[in-house]
Amino acid sequence: MTTIQEPVRRYFEDVEVGEELPSLVKEPVKHLQLVRYAGASGDFNPLHTDPKVGEEIGTGGIIAHGMLIMGFVGQLISDYVGPQAVRKFGVRFKGMTHLDDVITCTGTVTGKHEEDGQGVIAGKVQAKDQTGDVKVVGTFTAVLPHRDA
Amino acid sequence: MFDKEKIGHSFPPFSLSIERGKIHELALAIGDMNPIYHDQQAAQAAGYDDIPLPPTAPTILTFWGNTQLWEQLASVGINVKRILHGEEEYEYLAPIAPGDLLTGVTTIVDGKSRRGKDGSSMDIVTTETRYSNQQQQPVLSARTMFVVREQGE
């Protein structure tokens, strides 16, 4: 495994199993954001940007890129451990996100173990809208430094 | 119906260099205003060598790196008009920095079809893309599960 390049945010010893990641409440999803995300990611599927297409295929208007919602969850994890501490991050897409949905991302530390002398934490994460409808569930692992290292 | 013969099929390699501007643009679109993603000096002040990649930066590689993705999936019989994203998973194997030139190879690693009583069908196809840097060091592995639903006649 490669050495950590992440500046220290928190030590392995300071994280407890069951601990919650500080939750992240995003601004309402807007059409302009989806256009912006299309350009940033390169995913120009019109069902994310053209309301007519959304109506034709029965999604009730345009829907957000699933990867944008994964990006919100990525921000939650990045805020907690820093981007370069993350070793694995995976999600399942559970529901469609519509315009003006307010997405809240939450997460919990589910495990801690040692691997090749490094401290590894595991966590579960999810994203829900303002009605509690789950959009994304996922897991991650991250490497954290030891306090005495 | 997904053709199981396509499991193991790899598409031609593609390459993309990592640019600070694209990281800035992606973080803006996500609404992640952490200055480490937007300003090299802020990143260095926070202890990074350069601007780091946010966890979902691989999406830039997926689409901007491989502009032929949809055509390639269509070429193996996947109805890309009905494609839905089921799962996405990244394994970060080594640090990636601006200026790195990554090369990715996408392989179809799994696929199956299910048929409903009403004649509808659903294909579930998983791809894996392995990325190496300019030193041929593996840096990233990305798995994507697609779901394709077809209505019955």
Image (cartoon, rainbow, N blue to C red):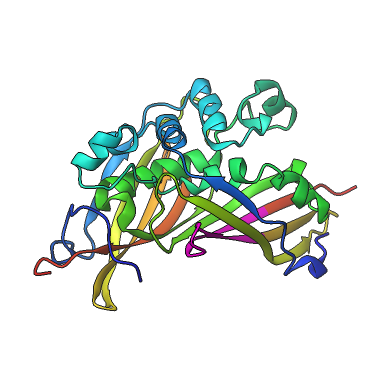
Which residue is rendered at x = 18% and y = 62% of the image? A15
**Measuring 55% from the left and 25% from the top, which residue is drawn there?**
A35
The x and y percentages for residue B141 are 52, 61
Image x and y of residue A96, in percent: 56, 39
Coordinates of residue A149 in the picture (x, y in percent): 12, 69
Q: How many marks?
A: 0
The magenta stretch is B126-146
Q: Is residue B59 left or right of residue B126?
A: left
Image quadrant where one finds the N terminus of chain B? bottom right
Q: Nearer the viewer, residue B104 or A112?
A: B104
The reply, left or right, for residue B129 in relation to residue B152 is left
Q: Nearer the viewer, residue B41 or A19?
A: B41
Q: Is residue A118 above or below residue A99?
A: below
Residue A133 shows in this picture = no
> Residue B2 falls in which quadrant of the image?
bottom right
Q: Residue at x 28, y 48 (%)?
A: B49
B79 up-or-down from A143: above or below: above
Q: Is residue A106 magenta?
A: no
Q: Residue furthest front?
A: B135
Q: Which is nearer the eye, B120 or B74? A: B74
- Tell me residue A30's x, y (percent): 48, 23
Q: Is residue B71 visible?
A: yes
The residue lying furthest to the left in this view is A148
Q: Main secondary structure of the magenta part?
A: strand
Left or right relative to B47: residue A76: right
Residue B130 sits inside the magenta stretch: yes
Residue A10 lies left or right of residue B83; in this view the side is: left
Residue found at the far bottom of this picture: A116
